[in-house]
Amino acid sequence: MINISEVIETNKMIEQENLDVRTITLGISLLDCADSDLDACCQKIYDKVTTMARDLVKTGEEISHEFAIPIVNKRISLTPISIVGSACCHTPNDYVKICQTLDRAAHEVGVNFIGGFSAVVSKGMTKSDELLIRSIPEALATTERICSSVNVGSTKTGINMDTVRLMGDIIKETAEATKDYDSLGCAKLVVLCNAPDDNPFMAGAFHGVSEADAIINVGVSGPGVVKYALEQMDKDGLQNFEVLCETIKRTAFKITRVGQLVAQEASARLNIPFGIIDLSLAPTPAIGDSVADILQCIGVERAGAPGTTAALALLNDQVKKGGVMASSYVGGLSGAFIPVSEDQGMIDAVNAGALTIEKLEAMTCVCSVGLDMIAIPGDTPNTTIAGIIADESAIGMVNQKTTAVRIIPVIGKDVGDTVEFGGLLGYAPVMPVNSFSCNRFVDRGGRIPAPIHSFKN
Amino acid sequence: MTRAIITVVGRDTVGIIAKVCTYLADKNINILDISQTIVQEFFNMMMIVDMSKCTSPFNTVADELAEVGTQTGVQVKCQLEDIFSKMHRI
């Protein structure tokens, strides 16, 4: 039987250490909504999303109430829209119309984000993919709750450099189109390599074509809980790596079990199959809910100091080792997130001069996911942004992992300024970018071949 | 059996347990176990209860118990047992 100290421990995690379930994401296939008529396609999409997700928010709130565990976000991921709209979209404006339809559906069912305004173009773009990509700036500027993602490479296919180059332009155009709101559109746009089909986290969530008609995926969180456990561990003196790793693993297990419980409850109540748990340490701007703070507990003075990459590697690994046993199915991104604007410890590290984009890039080699929520000067050249995407994609391609770039060139702002995105997106100091050019590299065109170790057949 | 955990946390005052128990009896909720401890000068009580014959919906009971707590100046929470058993038992 449960004893009082276990009850106190769990409730302390929830009340004082920011334990929460970060998201219940309902994945919905829209393959059956394709139509050669745009209006008919939009209507089918609207009807399917609002029908399938009708009870999502209410159910999430009920579960949250009954277990007294916060479930921060209720969200939806959809089949990449470039597939669904391929028969009826002949201009970028047609895709904007679908995006606006999705936004209305998001408001109708009460979710805070819908992901899947996406194109998967790891090897090449179809005409439809290109139209969707070119519609992104206006689509994100005229909607509120839609997230967009473009997968530009994979270990099996190599990197589609034509799209990488194009995304340099699209990110800047999106920044321009939303410049009145500190280029907020770019916070809802991510470029990925090796994007998973079942990721519940925004902005990169979409419902891959390998998935069933509908599925429940859950993302767990809990950096604050890990941080507290490490503080307690070292209370009576510095412990060795064995103790450190065991402590993280045990804590990750407990956090993930809560996610598994919520996922199974949501699946049963909505009568939709359970897909995966995403074992992620996802920080928020709340004090103490920070991955950077965990790195400090492990022993670096600030995130970015020498030792940070190794500390992050062991953290990421132990979170997986603890979490895998706690859940029947693990998937999505599964790892520690290192966004800048959403993590107070990261913001402090940047402001203190400890953390640079180059160090963040090194850190993305050993954790999920990539250069995330980083504000850069608004006059950064498009080709430089493409170069950053290419670098990050190369890390993903060679290491057989997901990597991503979600950077925000903030129009009208420069190094030393601060950008306020609000809510869970937080705020960020504008970071300097290497000013040397990569024009000739990204303008070559074509694609980078798949690495030798991808040929496993 | 629908089992829930009720926790009461706050400064020790006369009649806390009586009030919670009276409420539970009114709702036909059976108490299976009670334990209590003092943590950092705070009174912590935990009850394991069986709610299968309860006359009100779970969320109503949780809200009304929280209200009983507010009136007495303590925090009362009612949660389904699963969140604790899943976290602490393999």
Image: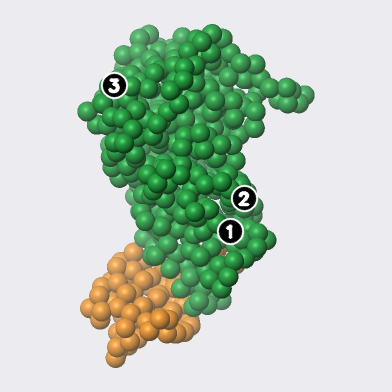
| Lateral position of residue A234 relative to residue A171, left or right | right
Q: Give the structural element (helix, strand or loop) at label 1.
A: helix
Give the residue pinned by disc 3: A176
> Dot 3: few (<14), some (14–19), or many (≥20) neighbours within 10 Å?
many
Q: Residue at x 33, y 70 (%)?
A: B61
Give the residue pinned by disc 2: A314
> Dot 1: few (<14), some (14–19), or many (≥20) neighbours within 10 Å?
many
Q: CA separation, marks 2 and 1?
A: 9 Å
Q: CA separation, marks 3 and 1?
A: 42 Å
Residue A379 numbered tag: none
What's under tag 1, amino acid-wise? Ile
What's under tag 3, amino acid-wise? Glu
> Dot 2: few (<14), some (14–19), or many (≥20) neighbours within 10 Å?
some
| Residue A24, horizontal then vertical, whole percent | 44, 46
Q: Give the structural element (helix, strand or loop) at label 2.
A: helix
Residue A248 numbered tag: 1
What's under tag 2, amino acid-wise? Leu
| Lateral position of residue A136 relative to residue A274, left or right | left
Is the residue under label 1 in contact with that under label 2 (CB below 8 Å)? yes
Q: Is residue A59 above or below residue A225?
A: above
Chain of the residue where label 2 is placed in the rendered structure: A
Quadrant into which the N terminus of chain A falls: bottom right
Q: Residue at x 55, y 57 (%)?
A: A298
Specify the colour of chain A.
Answer: green
| Residue A303, horizontal then vertical, whole percent | 49, 48
Specify the colour of chain B.
Answer: orange
Q: CA separation, marks 2 and 3?
A: 39 Å
Q: Give the structural element (helix, strand or loop) at label 3.
A: helix
Mark 3 or mark 1, which has the lower sequence index? 3
